[in-house]
Amino acid sequence: MRRALEHARRAIGRTTPNPLVGACIVTPDGIVVGDGCHERAGDPHAEVEALEEAGERARGATLYCTLEPCVHTGRTGPCTERIMAAGIVRVVAAMEDPFPLVQGRGFAALRQRGIVVDTGVARDEAVRLNQPFITAMREKRPFVILKAATSLDGRMAAAPGERTQLTSEASARHAHYQRAQVDAIAIGSGTLLVDDPLLTARLVYRERPLTRVIFDRGLRASPSARVFSTLASGPVIIVTSPEARRLHADRAHGLESAGATLLEVGDPSVTAAIRALSTHDIQSVLLEGGAAIHQAAWEEDVVDYVQLYVAPMTIGANAPGFLEGMAFTPASLHEQRTRALGPDSLIEGYVHRPD
Ligand SMILES: [Zn+2]
């Protein structure tokens, strides 16, 4: 199963809207005769890749897979049929597929045909690997990673509305690596106005377009913002309100001419804005700030994971703080990890224990 999980990991950041899945086939003598990874949506499923490599040697063998095999016909045929036809006698799976068309039906179909099915092997690891997919299925919204850079005393900038470069080159590199793994990066319109960021994943290889999202209910974004110079990296979605679109029709038109996709959401909550991204096949969002959008997301309990880049300096109590007035301490994160990035520290962890 560990080997299958390694194969699944190879496709991180590339499979949405599908889950990450790895598989391998082992003969009764303990010989691995097939490996598989679901590389991207539309490509063969991991089980099929492994079965094809194994060929005749799959007869009488055990299939290890990180997720329940599918039983429905999507872009590819059901894996359960292929597994039965290949002569697999036992299937070991890490977890059930939360996709509504599967949810245990894959296991049931295999058992019905006399195949031994064992589940729950390395389940914790498999669940953590597919948090975006699982969140999309269960909560009907993307998995939200809150990312922020702060000083040692938990401050975000020297003054409100001012840009302060806190963290090092090593932290910037890691942040770009993180951007390469998600479906979308999101910021508030205030950050767009103050920082005018490019919002691209630099210094890393990324195969798919990266969607950039601006939460902008008042339509304050300018068509000359630098993010519109990077449309080759991926689309720019501006989440706004129906009122703003009506009141500022010219601005809306200007932004669309600049290449933006306007997404109107009536409900003013951050949760509703994030949920609306599901319609664009987004299962993971890196929420990069600023302070207002971080605070609102935290207050609405829509944050799933926190990544805090902490620089070894103090700014002083007059500067705006990270999640000021909110019940947050890094110590309250589940499965918290800390690592050094040059002179900085990255503290990260889950807000709720994954299950
Ligand atoms: Zn399948």
Image (cartoon, rainbow, N blue to C red):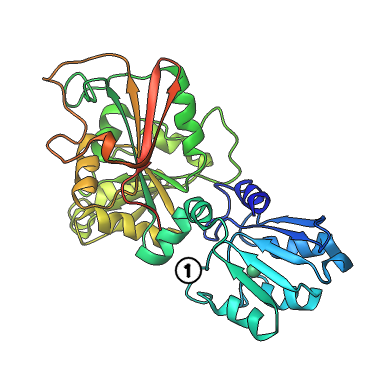
Q: Amino acid at mark 1?
A: Pro
- Where is residue 170 shown, x and y percent of the image? 47, 20
Residue displayed at 54% across by 46% down:
209
Mark 1 element type: loop
Image quarter where the C terminus lies is bottom left
- Where is residue 65 shown, x and y percent of the image? 64, 61
Residue displayed at 61% across by 57% down:
21
Indicate the quadrant of ligand 1 in the picture: bottom right
Q: Tell me if I can see residue 88 in this picture.
A: yes
Residue ranking furthest to the bottom: 112
Front position in the image: 108 or 40: 108
Instruction: Establish whether ligand 1 lies closer than 8 Å to the Cβ of label 1.
Output: no
Left or right of 150 on screen, residue 200: right
Front position in the image: 187 or 236: 187
Residue 349's image quarter? top left
Residue displayed at 61% across by 69% down:
118
- Residue at the disc numbered 1: 98
Residue displayed at 38% across by 23% down:
345
Front position in the image: 243 or 130: 130
Q: Tell me if I can see residue 218 in this picture.
A: no
Q: Is residue 233 above or below residue 163?
A: below
Q: Is residue 316 above or below residue 278?
A: above
Residue 52's image quarter? bottom right
- Where is residue 299 shown, x and y percent of the image? 18, 48
- Where is residue 277 shown, x and y percent of the image? 37, 57
Q: How many numbered badges does the structure rendering display?
A: 1
Residue ranking furthest to the right: 56
Front position in the image: 203 or 263: 203
